[in-house]
Image (cartoon, grey):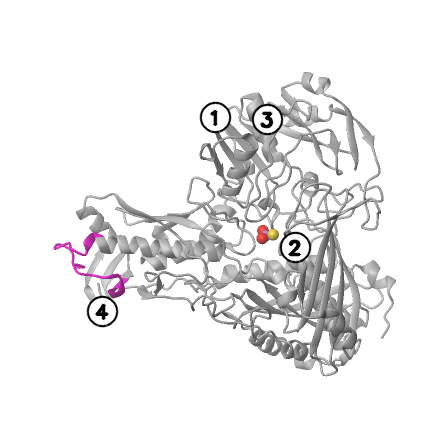
Amino acid sequence: MSTATIADIVGTARDRVDGRLKVMGAATYPIDVTLPGLAHAALVQSTIISGRIRDIAVDAAERAPGVLAVITHLNTPPLALAPVTAIGPQPLPPFQSDAVLHYGQHVAMVVAETREQANAAATLVDVAYERDTPLLSFDDPRTSPVFHPWTPDYDRGNVRGALAAADVQVNETYTTAENTNNPIGLFATVAIWNGDALTVHDTTQNPHGARDALAATFGIDPAGVRVLVPFVGGGFGAGLRVWPHVPLAVLAARITKRPVKVVLTRAQMFTSVGHRPNTIQQLSIGASRDGQLAAIEHVSRSSIGMEGELINLITYGTPHAYACPNVSTRATQIRQSIPTPGWMRAPGEAEGSFALESAIDELCYALGIDPIELRVKNHAHVHPDSGLPWSSNALLDCYRQGAERFGWSARNPEPRSMRNGGHLVGYGIARGALGAYQPPCKAIASIRRDGTAFVRSGATDIGPGPYTVMTMLAADCLGVPIDRVRFGLGDSAMPKAPQEGGSGLTGALGNAVHATCVSLVRAFVNLVREDERSPLKGCRLEGITVRDGGIQITGEPARFETYADMLTRHSLDELTVEGESAPPGETSSATMIVQAGRFIPYTTPSTGTRAHAGAYAAHFVEVHVEPDLGTIRVARVVSAVDAGRILNPKTARSQIIGGIAMGIGMALLEETVSDRTGRLVTTSLAEYVVAVNADVRDVVVLFIGEPDSMTPLGTKGVGELAITGIAAAIANAVYHATGTRIRSLPISIEKMLGQPATA
Ligand code: MOS
């Protein structure tokens, strides 16, 4: 074979392998699942905010046409709380008492032959409530702060003393509104019992987590539960927890002895699958006249529901953001009568970075120092706690190259000094960061006698593109043409994968797929190494190149054999191996990295010599503000991103653009609003305004930096990175344009008009 193709597909811009299926309507989301005998459930939700169910009359609903069952707290058996997972506690199981803790809480589920019958009967459920006074303010004396192990206090140095001694101080309070995830795909669950075996099609970002939670809730063996979710119509974190409608669908299927489907309405999506809680954050920063940071204090309060717990990382990034000797953070959650919050893209870190990066900007103006210069001056060249060098950190290059591309030097530092026609023009910058995270992950890989490869793992693809990048990676690692590689996911019967969340899946799954494919090639090497009839006799992993669906002795194109020929001669249908990722910073002597079809021994820097770095971004934003109307346009964004090795620049860029779009929403538009009584007002995408195409204009994404050294693959997360810092960059640009500092998200027109410019 003279035209050997040694593909390095990884690193090239590729379309989604599932794109065609999706645009053809052929991708099966949980909402699309149907089967013979399927019954349909509708949820009845509380119309009060706080209190108890005094009486719930279900007779009329039960007599309605087609109704199979009406489930309430009165006929629900005890359901166990699912155990705490690696990403924290699950919501409490539903229908366990008469208590009503928030507006929109499920109070009954009606199961009927058709969805229309279920919906009609649901209107006949008559609930009598006893109301009490909801907790709707952090300052309500009846509320209680929640202390749990997820957000420990952090202290470095002596913040109080350093603040008092600082030349210049910024002390400000920042607030962020409740935001709701709003994936386009309505969450759906289809539950099917077959004897004691349970199959669930569910909108989840974590099939194994959902399996384990349901097994615990119903007291059954996890081996008897299978969760399927080949496609997810977006999640942004909403699919990370097992929300009450999921066990309710399972319970309904058990009671009716029928497969049962429940689909949340758009309005129910606002109250039933979590949201980003609101925050009040106080930032105190002290610095010397020349801009050296002396102290940062970050104190956050955020809301949480009346029951349950939630990890919220509002102050998490602050201690390591800058080389500042004195830092302290406190994060408290305050119980409120609100729908149970959850995670939404960069949970906590999106809000925390808004406050921190706004306050840093305020410091720059107080000192008269350029915002890039101050950030560069206080860059954390080493990990501020351990003093170890980062495993990778190109943030300084992000500032430099981003500024260059954006044209930062054209900025007049004076607020309200730049104009474009009738518009005020502002330039803003902020730092974004997301911590390193790589949970354990397993995979399994096969090559079959027809020359195809099938690699799979029980992960999900909520949109970022694991289907695509894992197919690319497997093709490179195995030397099998990409159109002969299939990647499978979305099935808890596949090897255990973590949630797609925390921007950790590409690293976790990628390193698992990489390790598993290396093992599979090794298995083929072992198969033919002593094989007199193989041209590869005597081969070793270090001496081969994979290409064109087979193995070649490196440098000897004639000594090549396809996997299919090897299998055929050995009368095998396939070779299959299982594998898993090594934790970051840990590699065995047998670890290889695949480059251009060759297998190269790979070791990480020895443990304890590097701090595992996350991903970094420098966001540059230009806003145009109409001075009389207060309307703000984000005219352009340049995001310079260090996310380590980029497996597919096209899908990675899409993640950054998506994070920017969501960040524009967070900064200017998105707000989940309740009225004075605690009743939710924004219950559709007409009232809850997200950024649309017209709001997301000129966006440039620059990928900068090197593969991270802690793992063979060298990736860092891109899913959540862009929404950290972007809201602050926009707010900082608004200040530069107008001289008006808005410390409260969203920066609505009302706020712009309510606070006349001061400069
Ligand atoms: Mo995300 S909130 O890690 O899905």
Q: Relative to 40, is 330 on the left or the right?
A: right
Which amino acid is tagged 4? Gly
Task: Point out which mark residue 252 bears.
Answer: 3
Prevailing SS of the magenta stretch: loop
Instruction: Kindly indicate whether the residue at mark 2 contacts the one at mark 1 (C-beta within 8 angstroms).
Output: no
Task: Point out which mark residue 555 bears.
Answer: 4
Residue 729 coordinates in the image, percent (x, y): 69, 68
Task: Point out which mark residue 612 bears.
Answer: none
Q: Earlier in the sequence, mark 3 or mark 2?
A: 2
Q: Relative to 618, is 671 on the left or the right?
A: right
Q: How many angstroms separate mark 3 from mark 4 (CA)?
A: 63 Å
Give the SS element for disc 3. Answer: helix
Residue span colored magenta = 527-545
Q: Earlier in the sequence, mark 4 or mark 2?
A: 2
Residue 509 coordinates in the image, percent (x, y): 45, 53
Which amino acid is tagged 1? Asp
Q: Earlier in the sequence, mark 1 or mark 2?
A: 2
Task: Point out which mark residue 151 bears.
Answer: 2
Instruction: Kindly indicate whether the residue at mark 4 contacts the one at mark 3 (C-beta within 8 angstroms).
Output: no
Give the SS element for disc 1. Answer: loop
Q: Which one is nearer the viewer's eye here, 190 or 194?
A: 194
Work out which residue is located at the far left of the displayed protein and give it.
Answer: 532
Which amino acid is tagged 3? Ala
From the viewer's perspective, is the residue at label 3 or at label 4 nearer? 3
> Is residue 189 on the magenta stretch?
no
Query: Dividing the picture into quarters, in which one does residue 758 lie?
Result: bottom right
Q: How many angstroms separate mark 1 from mark 2 (CA)?
A: 39 Å
**Number of other residues with Cα within 10 Å of mark 4, as a class: few under 14, some 14 to 19, many 20 or more:** few
Question: Which residue in the structure is indicated by mark 1?
Answer: 196
Work out which residue is located at the far bottom of the displayed protein and give it.
Answer: 290
Q: Earlier in the sequence, mark 3 or mark 4?
A: 3
From the viewer's perspective, is the residue at label 3 or at label 1 nearer? 1
